[in-house]
Image: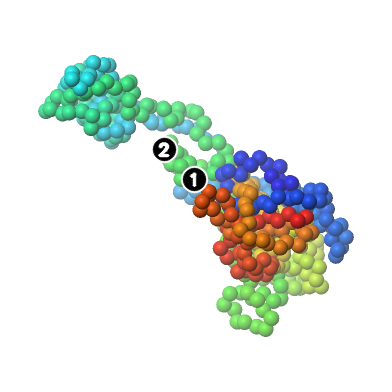
Amino acid sequence: PSPELGWNIPTSTFARTMGTFLVSPPTGTPTPGMPRHDKESGPTMISVAQALSRMLPAFSPVGTERRMLLAAQDAHLAVSVNARRDLPAFDNSAMDGYALRHDALDTATDQHPVSLTLQGESRAGSQMPGSLAPAVTMRIFTGAPLPEGADAVELQENVERCGTQVLFRRPVSSWANVRRQASDLTAGHPLLQAKTRLGPAELALLASQDIATVEVFRSPRVAVLSSGDELREVGEANRPGSIVNTNAYALAAQIREAGASPWILPVARDRMEDLLERVAQGLQADVLLCTGGVSVGDHDLVRQAFSEAGVKQDFYKVAMKPGKPLAFGIHGNTPVVGLPGNPISAMVTFELFVRPGLRRMIGDPYPFRTRVLARLDHDHRHSPGRLEFARATLLRDARDGSPRLTMHARQGSGSLTSSVGANALAMLARGR
């Protein structure tokens, strides 16, 4: 783990998550976790690691709900589930061939094949076949139940059929090509543990046990409040000095990707009464995200609105780039996060601080992204002072498969094009 982030989590815990952070060696960095001096207002900036350690405990599961299997995909189990029945439920054939008693072929060779009498067949979906006599074989198909008395299946391509007689030219071992009853699962034994993510295989396993509904962690509802007199909606008539509220679209998409449900509130104008009305509305959600208005300008009123709404504020400003003006507080059990207004700053701070919290709320035991060490394909100038998260593209070297990194040309916090096509954030140490 990167000392600058302070995520004291074994690398193995990242194996089941998707996405990548790219870590450059943090040589020459100050002591991790120490507050940074902020020229604007004294030593108020905290490290990324400190911000995470303060925020994540506030993001707790908000309850459970029962869902039908197909509606539970990508959710996380709220309770452990035990097997209801054996899997497979009965001995069945793994191949098309002939069911028999294996000891009937002990003397079979190419020169002296053993002849067994063919009697009936067993196919998938049919009734259970009758018992098998010692010198008798039965035609059987993949998935079909094994007749009583049989303990092996010989492949059809290894035998010769002559009317009602079948010639076998080699011995077979007991239970060859047979799926034994309960070889996968035994009734009553653990099936899936709580917090397991329900992907295609997990849903199929539940279905195999005739489990139609499951108890999962509820997806949190996340209110998104954009603030600013300059904002307008997509399709709204353009006016001088206005910009489209793009943050609402980016954050809604990020919220969905994290497994939560976005609730986009009407834009709040730079007036305290308007902000207070919208904040009060947003506090009805499980999480409130505000974007814009959290800096130190004369019209940045969001943090004041938080205070007047009763939000217990924890910190403001993080020693990172982009995204220094990040505010966090709690109202009752509701986490309240003030994200920067610049589009890239809002997206990066969401990715770093809010997404892991939302993943915890839905029961994900591995809420962080995967991190790897990669080599830059080119020089990149980084101003020391703050840990930087730069938009980048990670590729694998065609020769040896090693991870290689290309920084995007534009890294400004207002440049939407800098994130298009990016599949990684490059962590650039603040001291280099």
Q: Quick one: quadrant of the N terminus? A: top right
Asked which quadrant contains residue 195, the reply is top right
Horizontal placement of 20 versus 73: left or right?
right
> Left of 220 or right of it: where is 88?
left
Q: Residues within 10 Å of mark 1 (few under 14, many from 20)?
A: few
360, 427: nearer the viewer = 427
Q: Which residue is mark 2?
A: 208
Does residue 401 appear to the left or right of 242 in the view shown?
A: left
Residue 382 percent coordinates (x, y):
73, 61
The three-letter amino acid code for the residue at tag 1 is Gly
Residue in the foreground of this view, choosing between 144 and 264: 144
From this view, report whether residue 417 is shown above or below residue 156: below
Can residue 17 be seen in the rendering of this structure?
yes
Q: Which residue is mark 1?
A: 199
Q: Is residue 405 above or below residue 69?
A: below
Q: Could you tell me which secondary element the residue under label 1 belongs to? A: loop
Residue visible at 57% across and 38% down? Answer: 194
User: Label 1 to label 2, Cα distance in Å?
Assistant: 14 Å
Q: Mark 2 belongs to which amino acid? A: Ser
